[in-house]
Image (spheres, rainbow, N blue to C red):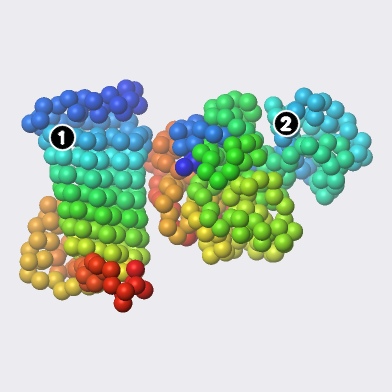
Amino acid sequence: MEYDITATGIRGLNEKLHAEPADSSQNWNVVNPNGAHAIAVGLNAPLNVSINGSTGYYCAGMNKLASVKVHGSVGPGAAENMMSGSLTVDGDASQYAGASGHGGLLNIKGNASSRCGISMKGINIVVHGNIGHMSAFMAQSGNLVVLGDAGDALGDSLYEARLFVRGEVKSLGADCIEKPMREEHIAFLAELLNEAGADATPDQFKRYGSARELYHFNIDNASAY
Amino acid sequence: MCGIIGLFLKDQSLQPRLGKLLAEMLVTMTDRGPDSAGVAVYSSDEIDTIKVTLQSLNPEADFAELQQKLGAEMGCTVDVQIVDTHAIVRLPGSRAGDITDALAQVCPSLRVMSTGKSVEIFKEVGLPAEVIERFSIDKLSGSHGIGHTRMATESAVTTLGAHPFSTGYDQCLVHNGSLSNHNLKRRELIREGLTFETDNDTEVAAAYLTHKLNQGNSLGEALEASIDDLDGFYTFLVGTQNGFGVLRDPIACKPAVLAETDQYVAFGSEYRALVNLPDIQSAKVWEPEPATVYFWEH
């Protein structure tokens, strides 16, 4: 199926995608996105949606089951609160990509800017380039994998999400520390890198996680907040 | 919220289309701020002439005999081009320093939107499409320009509260965000002798840059200094006679997209502001880094 957003509007596209049967694996080819907001949000079926061009805010937000591919770059909040399925971005992602995502794979072939994976809750995010500052802030679970460099304050106030970075980390946020790569991490990372088609091996990465000192307020840690 | 846009042309053959391109970009950003809109356009076609953009609450009365009165007061040839609520006054460059006093004598209620060799600023309350039509902005040509559509957060919805704010001779500023220490900075700048027309936070940023430039700093240095001195959220787009610059605060929540081709550099709050630009598909498109000054000049 083909849909022209500029000709027919964003609301019509999302209505058609939502009207698909729950088990539909229909292919949708979306053209002329022209940076429109909320493209392919709230999908609830294993659809294959290909978007030819760059998108605005919240592309594939709240996605469940669908595989969404963007042949371009995405604006703020891509795959925000994704439950399952995947969003693959050929270009770059703007701020807070994958924010609060519960599941699925967000695969960004370019760079992601600030606050990537903020408050992530189970999503896997693979960024083939660099990520900006305050990424994985208060991240609760899931995995953030970065083949390039990470900006300032990575993993600030981190809970139990795991962060894997191949390049340099400009600075770690409060309560985020480097941790050893154990066998289980190497095995898991190999699988995720393979799924994301990433040109990297697990031994090139460092793992970062929570020091677990800020879970509960302790007056002795006041200066770290 | 607010939406900001800018276009810096490298290819002179695009200059007749500057106003049209800016107009399309600004209208696309309408839903980021429907309160008021404004555009600054830079074009310097007249040697030894300066342009003063004026705005009036009663344009029919104020502008009717302005050309004769100003000419008589200043003792030189003055040209007045009326554009809706605005008027562009052209006068010999050597008399630039006398215009403020002359206006105070002839018509003190007029507001000066901009002064410079190249810049003209048009801004009013209303939707971008309405403001563009009132001032025929899509017909303007020039080398570069910036624009703003406003969702007011810090001060009243008035013409003077609209952007761009003039920051000095041939300089202007548009802003997406809100400053949290603008009252403190306004008091400091008033003590330094600067004057303010509004309670608006962006006017403080504009005055801050003017003050830094008056102290001998370059625009780049003034922008660098603002990272330490101005607290709050901002993406600034600054116009000068020869170019434009971009600065985002260190937190960088306010969106910003830059695009560059051999023909132009373009700025938009969102990518969709840029989609109608020539050959945008082959442009280098990126998000400016936080706390980093970007600048292009002719």
Q: Can residue B21 be seen in this view?
A: no
Quadrant where the image shows the C terminus of chain A: bottom left
Residue sitting at x 28%, y 55%: A118
Quadrant where the image shows the N terminus of chain A: top left
Instruction: List the residue tagged with mark 2.
Output: B57
Quarter of the figure with residue A7: top left
Q: From the viewer's perspective, is B110 left or right of B155?
A: right
Which of pointers 1 and 2 indicates the residue nearer the eye? 2
Quarter of the figure with residue A185: bottom left
Judge if badges 1 and 2 mark residues of a common chain: no
**How many numbered markers are drawn?**
2
Q: From the viewer's perspective, is B160 left or right of B79?
A: left
Q: Can residue A180 be seen in this view?
A: yes
Judge the density around disc 2: few (<14), some (14-19), many (≥20) Cα neighbours within 10 Å: few
Disc 2: which chain?
B
Residue sitting at x 62%, y 33%: B124
The answer to whether B134 is drawn above or below residue B8 in the figure is: above
Q: From the viewer's perspective, is B255 left or right of A110?
A: right
Q: What element carries label 2?
A: loop
Q: Are marks 1 and 2 in contact (CB under 8 Å)?
A: no
The CA span between labels 1 and 2 is: 55 Å
Outermost residue toward the bottom? A220
Disc 1: which chain?
A
The answer to whether A30 is drawn above or below residue B239 in the figure is: above
Residue A98's disc is none
Instruction: List the residue tagged with mark 1.
Output: A44
Residue sitting at x 47%, y 42%: B1
Kind of residue at disc 1: Asn
